Structures are given as structure tokens and as C-alpha cells.
Image (cartoon, rainbow, N blue to C red):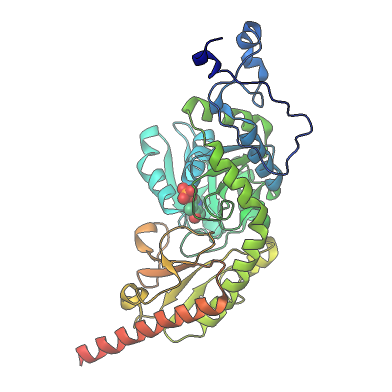
Amino acid sequence: MREETLSLERVPVSTEGYDALTVPVHRASTIRYADAESFACRAERGADGYVYGLYGTPTHRYLEGKITAMQRGARSVLLPSGQAANVCAMLAVLKAGDRVLLPDNCYGPTRDFAQTDLPGLGITAEFYDPTDLAALERQVPGARLIWAESPGSLTLEMQDIPAIVAIARRHGALTGCDNTWASPLNFRPLEHGVDLVAEALSKHFGGHSDLLMGSVTVADPALGLRLKAQMGRYGIGVSPDDVALVMRGIETMALRMTRAAATALELAEWLAGQPHVARVLYPALPGSPGHDLWTRDFRGASGLFSVVFDDAAAPHILPALDALRVISIGASFGGTRSLAAPSAVPPLRSATRWTGPEFVLRLSIGLEAPEDLKEDLARFLAAAETCIAAARIKKS
Ligand SMILES: *Cc1c(COP(=O)(O)O)cnc(C)c1O
């Protein structure tokens, strides 16, 4: 063999006795076949066989299997983002002529997809009040899918998932749930009869703000096979390097989430007692809306909550945030570092009326020392107080 050819050959390496604790990263587009016959029959390898990189390598199987086990499901698929997970979960079960119901507080880009793209596919999207079960029951007849997200984005209303599943079943509808806030460590929708559960793995699973990925897990193996085949036809796959990062993130997810939730509860309690804080929206906080459902159904919390300010402070939230030194301003959550995201609620509501000020402050609590975060929030509150006083002087 000449040098060029030799340099392309894979030398034989024994894997005997090699059983590392870590997940190997298998990067591959092409899978090699032992002979022409096995290549010709490759479709017979089935959904879990290896035929081409797009359909998964052992690295992908590790994460799919891990998520399936954590969700107590039958099969999972990996998507390039949490948004793709929501979209693909819906497209797996919706077709032209169908109607889907989404909670009014669902993830913003998912609302946008439902409003902008579903009509073009002949699918009707309607929004519902996430906490009004009687109104939902009236809206369901004829719907193909009820989507849920609990707690919901920005305002964190809890949904009664078992009751929503019961309503769906009475009317022959399927249910899907965006479970990103809780993760399967704290809530497992499939155990309550939900048909499809989506997760943004970019958040708690990855856990370090350095990747984007999503997953959809289903309880019905036949639906799982249809979903897997559909994602293949759409050409959707994820990088094995990112998969390995998620696998690493999962190992510390319980520790990270427990710590973040403990700090978040401490800060939420403290914030609730501060001047100009009208409400703290955090289901884990006693007295917060949805706390009873959270206590009944969830095993724990994440470190994500929202703060609603009174009318005096609300107009000054944006400039006051510039006083933060530890907490970064930015979207997303579930990372090691705390984030603040001032978020406008009214543009993202259509079935319910938001009665608070335009902006809520969403805080994603990370792993910093709680005292440093409290001092940082105190700096922000003091800056808001200064703005309020300046506005008062200007007015008089
Ligand atoms: C962030 C988020 C998503 C989308 O996840 P990406 O990976 O950022 O696309 C979906 N649902 C919820 C509730 C989220 O918070």
C-alpha cells in the first residue's frame, strides 16, 4: 500500500477490556458495512441499528436511552434545540385540518411558530387560559392536541396536568408538555398520561450555557418509531460532541438544580418582602400562585422565577438593572451563572389578560454564593429606588 492510501486506512485497535465510565464520542457520517449484502439490507437494522450518521451513533443512543429512562418513556429523539423539540413534537401528531390548543403562557417562540407557521400547514392554533380547566374543556371538542407547559414561561402559572390529561382523553385528544422548567428530575409528564414530553436540554441538562439541544420522549413505542422516522426524513440530527456535553451535564444536574432551587427560594422569600416588589411568581414559594399544585405533583424546583414590581418601580427596572455586577443580563436558564431577563408579557398573551406592569423580571439563579446574589439584587433595588426618587423630583 502506498503512503496516501495507508494514511487513510484505519488500523485495527482492540476494544476488549475497554469499559470507560465516560461516554465515548463517536463522530460519523458513514457507517462501514462488512459486505454488499448487509449494505443492501441495511433498512432491516431497524430504528436502533446503525446505518448512517444522521440516524445516530452509539453516542446518540446513550443520551436517547438516558432521557427515555429519566422520563419513564418508550423512545426519545434528539433535536438541535428546545424550540425544535416543541415544533417537532407538534408536527409528529398534527396534520392539515387539525386544531391544537396551546397555553397562553407557552414559550414565546413556540407561540410564534403556532401563530405564524401552523396556519400555512392547514392547522389551526388556539390559545387557552392555562389555569381555567372549565374553559379548556369547552374549547377541546374536535381538537387533536392539547399542548401544556407547567409552570409556564415568564409568569410561571402551574397547570393541573392530570386534570388536563383527563379532559383530553374524554375528547379523544392527545397531550404534549414542555417540561423544561422542571426537568424529569422534578416532574415526569408521561407518568401522568401525557403522550409527548419536550425538554430544552440547553437548560438544566447541558447546564453550562454552552450548547443548544432538545428532546422529545413518548410513551407509545409506535409513535416513537414514527417520530424517529419523521426526524430522519426532515434531516434533523445533533452533533455527538454536543451530546457528550449533555451527558456530562446530566451527571451533576440533580446537584445543580437542588442548589439553585435552594438559593432561589431564599432570594424569592427575601425579594417578596422588599419595597416595590408587588409579587414573586415562583411555584416553590409558599403563598405563590400554583404552590398547591407544585406541592402535589412536583418533587422539587428549578432556580427560575419572576418578580413583578409595583407601578412606582416598574418604569425604572431596565435602567436599574445596569447596577448588577454578579448577575448577567441575558436569556435562557439552568446554567451555572445567574441571569436576569426583563421580559414584556403583554405581547405574548392573547387568551388571558395580564394585569401587572408590562415588564416582569425573570431571574435564573445559578451556583454563586447566595450572599453575593442578594447583595447584587440589593444594588439593583437601590438603583431602582434612586430612579423613583429622581422621577418624583422631576414631577414636582
Ligand atoms: C428555552 C426554552 C425552550 C427552547 O429551548 P432552546 O434550546 O433555547 O431552543 C423551550 N421551552 C421553554 C419553556 C424554554 O424555557
Residue appearing at x 51%, y 33% in the figure: 237
Image location of residue 5, percent across then percent down: 52, 13
Q: Which of the pair 100/37 is nearer the observer?
A: 37
Instruction: Using residue 198 as the reference point, say whether residue 18 is left or right of it.
Output: right
Which residue corresponds to the image point at 52% horizontal and 50% vertical from the top-left? Answer: 202
Residue 389 vertical placement versus 33 (above, below): below
In this view, 335 is above or below 221: below
Residue at the (55%, 48%) spot, across then down: 201
Rendering quarter of residue 174: top right
**Residue 387: x and y, percent?**
30, 84
- The picture places residue 209, in percent across and down from the top left corner, at 49, 55
Q: Is residue 315 left or right of residue 236?
A: left
Decide: is 357 above or below 83: below
Whether residue 197 is visible to the viewer of this picture, yes or no, is no
| Residue furthest to the top | 37
Query: Where, by quadrant of the figure, is residue 309 drawn?
Result: bottom left
- Point out residue 329 in the picture as x, y percentages from the top left corner: 40, 66
Task: Work out which quarter of the rendered image holds the C terminus and state it.
Answer: bottom left
Eyeballing the image, is 41 above or below 216? above
Q: Quadrant of the N terminus?
A: top right
